[in-house]
Image (spheres, helix red, strand yellow):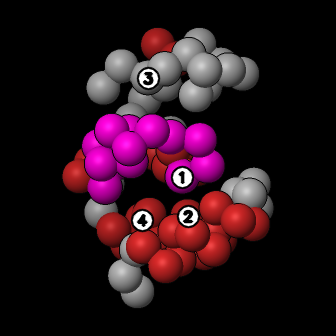
Amino acid sequence: MEFRRSLFWDVDPSTIDEEKHARYIIERILDFGTDKEARWMYQRYPHTIIRDVLNHSRVLIPKTRALWNELIPQ
């Protein structure tokens, strides 16, 4: 997937590796992603990894965490 520059404003999106930077990508999509990006993330990464990021990330916005906790099954 080609990432939006506004989603990854602090790095060059072309340098992001989907496997190596999975946690970073998931955090950004959970906080700032579009519906299309969220669907891509949900299909691309195992739900256990998304859940792990949701439970352990130190950078997620608290309201984001609350919303996604309702949407992603335990």
Q: Which mark is first along the chain, 3 or 2?
A: 3
Depicted 55 relative to depicted 7: above or below: below
Name the quadrant of the C terminus: bottom left
- On the image, numbered disc 2 is attached to which residue? 53
Q: What is the secondary structure assignment of the residue under circle 1? A: helix
**Disc 1 and disc 4: Cα gap in Å?**
13 Å
Q: Which residue is mark 4?
A: 49
The stretch drawn in magenta includes residue 34? yes
Report the mark closest to the observer, 2 or 1: 1
Residue at the disc numbered 1 = 30
Give the magenta part as a residue range.
Answer: 30-42
Considering the numbered disc 2 on the image, is that residue within a helix, a strand or a loop? Answer: helix
User: Residue 11 placed where, x, y %?
Assistant: 65, 19
Give the residue drawn at x 45%, y 39%.
Answer: 34
Please state the horizontal and vertical placement of residue 49, each as a whole percent of the image: 42, 65
| Element on which disc 3 rests | loop
Query: Which one is closest to the eye, mark 1 or mark 4?
Result: 1
Cα distance in 3D space between marks 2 and 3: 19 Å
Q: What's the mark number on residue 7?
A: none
Magenta span: chief secondary structure: helix
Q: CA distance from mark 1 to mark 3?
A: 14 Å
For marks 2 and 1 on the same chain, the one whose residue lies earlier in the sequence: 1
Q: Is residue 8 above or below residue 19?
A: above
* First of labels 1, 4 by sequence position: 1
Circles 2 and 4, Cβ within 8 Å, touching? The answer is yes
- The residue most toward the left is 43
N-terminal of the pair, mark 1 or mark 3, is: 3
Task: Give the x, y percent position of residue 17.
Answer: 43, 29
Q: Quadrant of residue 7?
A: top right
Q: Quadrant of the N terminus?
A: top left
- For label 3, the residue is 3
Q: Amino acid at mark 3?
A: Phe
